[in-house]
Image: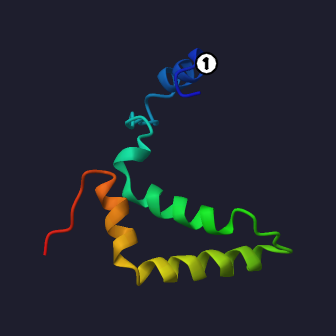
Amino acid sequence: MHLTKPLREFIAANADWLTVFQLPTYAPDLNPQEGIWSLVKRDIGNLAAVDLSQITRAVKRKLKMIQYRLHLIDGCLTGTGMTLDD
């Protein structure tokens, strides 16, 4: 969408007040939080929630569980090539 001709024309026509920053393309393999969200989605993927609060509780519960299992966090970091230095 950001590369469409009408949007480029809009940006050019409004350059006096509009500043556009080109961000890098989506790279989930370089973002360790994508691994965390993958773990969360895997756990609640089949949840038949009756309301948003039930989904919220399930996500918070899974994130809390991940918080205390450092090997999961380390695995998500390893997938990106990053490490935590003490």
Mark 1 highlights which residue? 6
Above or below residue 85? Residue 64 is below
Which image quarter: residue 77? bottom left
The residue at the point 61 percent across, 18 percent down is 6
Estimate the x, y position of residue 27 in percent, counting from the top left.
Answer: 41, 41
Q: Is residue 35 left or right of residue 82?
A: right
Q: Is residue 19 left or right of residue 11?
A: left
Above or below residue 63? Residue 31 is above
Estimate the x, y position of residue 14 in percent, counting from the top left.
Answer: 51, 28
Total numbered circles: 1
- Given residues 21 and 82, the one toward you in this image is 82
- Given residues 29 and 46, the one toward you in this image is 46
The residue at the point 50 percent across, 82 percent down is 65
Give the quadrant of the N terminus. Answer: top right
Estimate the x, y position of residue 37 in percent, counting from the top left.
Answer: 52, 62
Mark 1 crowdedness (10 Å alpha carbons): few <14, some 14-19, many ≥20: few
Give the quadrant of the C terminus. Answer: bottom left
Q: Say which element carries label 1.
A: helix
Amino acid found under the numbered disc labelled 1? Pro
Which image quarter: residue 85? bottom left
Above or below residue 7? Residue 25 is below
